[in-house]
Image (spheres, coloured by chain):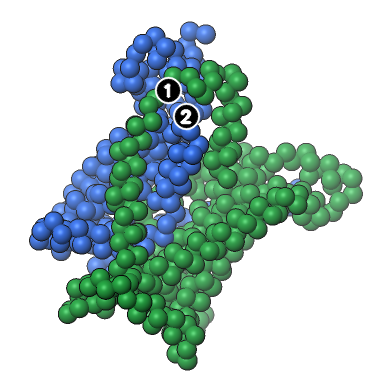
Amino acid sequence: MASTEAEATEHRRGDTRAGAGGPRYPGWLALPAVTWYLLFFLVPLGFIAVTSFGEVVGFSDVAYTWTLDNYRYLWDDFFGDFHLYRDIYFETFKLSVIGTLSTLVIGFPLAYYIARYAKHKTLLLLLVIVPFWTSFLIRAYAWLIILDPEFPVFRALGISGFVESHELLFTPKAVYIGVAYNYLPLMVLPLYAALERIDWSLVEAAQDLGDPPWRAFRRITLPLALPGVLAGSLLVFIPLTGEYIIPVILGGNKTFYAGNLIAQQFLESRDWPLGSALAMVVIGALTIALLVYARALGRQEQHS
Amino acid sequence: MTGRRLLGGYAVLAYVFLYAPIAVVVVFAFNGGRDVLYWQGFSTKWFETALRTPEITNALKLSILIALGNAIVACVLGTMLALALPRMRPWIRTPIDALAYMTLVTPEIVFAIAALVFFVQAGNRLGIDSPLGWHTILIAHVVFNASVVALVVRARFVSMGQQLEEASFDLGAGPLSTFRQVTLPRLAPAILAGGLLAFTFSFDDFITSFFVTGTESETLPIYIWGQLRFGVTPAINATAAMMLAFTLVVVVVAYLVLRRSGQERDGATLPGV
């Protein structure tokens, strides 16, 4: 989608500049980066694809036997009586969906305010970006302090008992709070980019013509903000499917998601083939989800 | 008007939400007591403790060295890519674009274990005993940071127009002298900003570093992770506060560099016309 947009822009610009056939930087300049991507990104992904068909020999060595055992094992789990892995994948999907929705709900009014009403837009936007560029790990563990019932601010407010009775830390609730917090900037940026382009006189016109504010919002603002909503949702949803840091730190490693599951095979169980197969399931599910999403998007565009 | 007020109030709360956790870490780094959660007076002693702990200073040094090396390599690869891409034929540009975006959106844990498997297996084939270390962290970080630099540089390169480059090529200059004399002076702020962002990405990275490092090389985030097993301590908060301050400075510099170059753009694109 982005590339066709860029193409269209280039095409339009092409009228004022010399044509696209004019002299330019040679294409081989892309070679070093492309080589790096192939060698250290695509080939490694190929390695785990191959490893997922292998088996463990001895303590942790991998034999490439082209067996389907790992996938058969997962298949049996998914459709069998134990469905341990199925439950974890389902929890991961739930985390990704709820995480995306909560950043959307928290982030939309903020992006809306900055885009429509704020005086110092650049500054306020910068203030949203800064946390994004600071350490993810530190922002996650900060909640270890805040969610502790002994947190001084809670003690001062006299609500320690309340926090304690809700047992937030090392539960899925803490994980959800951490996710909503850590991923918020990633959602606000694209939302702002879309809202910022809206011509607000359209909304005012709708209201002047008798639309109550909510209807003007639904009929004008929301459709125009949709590209931002979709972009932000993708930016939050995709990395969440492999979230690892937050469940370990705030979930106390008691709550399990796909990211922990994969990591465990490499850090503790030393079962690389099974870990690779678990990762391939995430990649496969993501690919299918993105294709369905792209198709739905294409269909919707045809309709409108 | 009331809606606007309400949203304004909400925005204030949202910013409190965004910054409170960061502030908590920084404030509690100045706690004089040994227990994180009981305030026992202002003190900078945990910063002194942190700076006198060899594990922390060594990890800090390693993190900075890797981040620097990563930023330099990412700048070279990313800038070359950004120069080549805009005028490539779509059939070749689209897959390269997709690949670059993939390096940025793939769940990091998947890339991290893929890189681990690759480095270990490739090391075994090549007969290298312990293939993992600072160099594998560096190689892995460059993968997604080259894309970060390419993204920033390309946006500037496309928006500034390429008439000057075309004139330069028409007048017989090669790619290298055109880059040195025509493109680089205008693109330098974007390259610098991209490099600074790549630096912070690498400096803060935990997951990839954690999986592809050997037993010897511990970056600062890996050190903090290891310590968190024993709970949060004021010394960890002090270390984290220093990390935050460091990143903050780099990000603000990157922002200012980019903004200045943005303001100069209109004047600088075509000086003679």
Q: Which chain is green?
A: A
Q: Percent x, y for residue A184?
A: 52, 57
Q: Nearer the viewer, residue B210 or A301?
A: A301
Q: Nearer the viewer, residue A191 or A160?
A: A191
Q: Percent x, y for residue B171?
A: 39, 9
Point 26% across, 63% down: residue: B117
Q: Percent x, y for residue A207?
A: 84, 47
Point 63% across, 45% down: residue: A194
Q: How many marks?
A: 2
Question: Circle 1 — which element?
Answer: loop
Judging by the rendered image, the residue that carries numbered circle 2 is B87
Please tell me how crowded label 1 is: few (under 14), some (14-19), or many (20+) other residues with Cα within 10 Å. Answer: many
The colour assigned to chain B within the rendered structure: blue
Q: Nearer the viewer, residue B10 or B86?
A: B86
Q: Are marks 1 and 2 on the same chain?
A: no
Residue farthest along the bottom direction in this orientation: A81
